Amino acid sequence: MQNLLSELRSLVGETHVLSEENLSAWEQDWRKRARGKALAVVLPGNTAEVAAVVQACARHRAQHPDQHLSIVPQGGNTSLVVGATPDESGRQIVLSLQRLNQVRALDAANQTLTAEAGCVLQAVQEHALNAGYLFPLSLAAEGSCTLGGNLGSNAGGTQVLRFGNTRELCLGLEVVTAQGEVWNGLSGLRKDNTGYDLRHLFIGSEGTLGIITAATMKLYPLPAAQLTAWAVVPSMQAAVTLLGLAHRHLGAGLTGFEVMGQFALRLVDKHFKQLRVPLWLDGPFCVLLENSDHESEAHARLQFEGLLEAALTDGCVTDAVVAENLSQAKALWQVRESISLAQSQEGLNIKHDISLPISNIPAFVQSTDAALAQAIPGVRLVNFGHLGDGNLHYNVQAPEGVDAAAFLREHEPKVNSLVFDAVTYFGGSISAEHGIGSLKLHQLVHYKSPVALTMMRSIKRALDPHNLMNPGRVLSV
């Protein structure tokens, strides 16, 4: 394949095709669950170069089908389901979008921002903020993940209940197809009823249909005030009751509603002593709420006071505190966002990114907690997530003193089956915001409708007939 590498170097520049260097930054997945071997890492500098690289790879694939060359698009390499890591074949090109990192335009009147796929999410947020707007997509990896990866996995985050997933924030895409053609759909239109909405095929496709190179995203006015509260609740059912009260008292101002189990908070307290975990000993779950008000801070605080008074009277909250300033609010959010890091410090764990009808979450948690405790005595459950939109990160940690790697080898298939069967029984999905990647590839065929899988495979064959784009992810073809 040296002829191909020489051609790629002529297309993007000698220094932007890496093959002999240490490629671990591109070959190791975020959770350290997998390590692959890339033929090369290619870093194009613009959309035209992305298209040229794909064309070259497509020609090579057609001329040498026995070599099974393929492309793995990669943004910030923060996938939690091994969705952007090369396999061990040494026949995959990692196409990194890191150099496509420009914000192309901000249209104030249209309240849109057009940015390239390699823009780090935090940089997009800051660009919008500097112009006096809010870009509401927010997640723990925002300092590393990229806009293209957010779109490719249809990322969620902490404000989905108000603004929706990345899909709802996107008005248009620029995409390089599996044939190396460029589709420019960066219109920024909120209404365009001219046939199939092609952007929705590529959003959430995890790079298996084409490569997103740029996107036009919605912006929102900045709120006049943003207040954060932390509440202790006696049960998951009480948390759901509190959510209903919050909707009634705060309306569209409710922009964050996170639930955290006590063991998840204990891990933060154990591994990040510098963070003060408030009120966590008083109940099995805590809730973090955010109220974004477009009137004033005084109005936002009055709304929060009314909500918490009603919740304390109802009994769904046993204790609560409202942040007095921005520093306190950031400290509360830092506790929430440190749970995943604390889990990593504790050792490898079995992650589940699930969604359920909110009304079914208490019954799911009660029954699945009990089933896991019976199947694996001493198992520890790291249960937290975006209760406001029905998304739990229902993770399973080895019993105290048990080797984490050995626990995964012995119990992961059984635990996954138990949890996913319960999710299906309660009307949920086995992936809420992380995607399928390769980790959940074989589970999907058991939990997705055969009719849906047939349609998905038809789309894959139509858009990528030679299986060039990120094979072995989402669908087995």
Image (tube, rainbow, N blue to C red):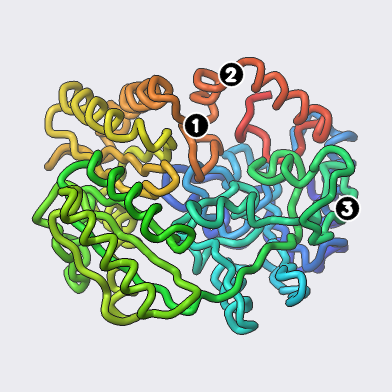
> Which residue: 35% across, 47% down?
244
Q: Nearer the viewer, mark 2 or mark 3?
A: 2
**Apparent side of residue 53 relative to residue 139 in the rendered image (left or right):** right
Indicate the quadrant where residue 327 lies: bottom left
Mark 2: amino acid: Ser
Discs 1, 3 touching: Cβ within 8 Å: no
Q: Which residue is mark 1?
A: 440
Q: Residues within 10 Å of mark 3 (few under 14, many from 20)?
A: some
**Nearest the camera: 106 or 447?**
106
Gap in Å between the C-alphas at discs 1 and 3? 30 Å
Discs 2, 3 touching: Cβ within 8 Å: no
Gap in Å between the C-alphas at discs 2 and 3? 32 Å
Circle number at residue 449: 2
Q: Work out which quarter of the rendered image holds the C terminus and state it.
A: top right
Circle number at residue 182: 3
Element class at badge 1: loop
Q: Residue furthest top?
A: 450
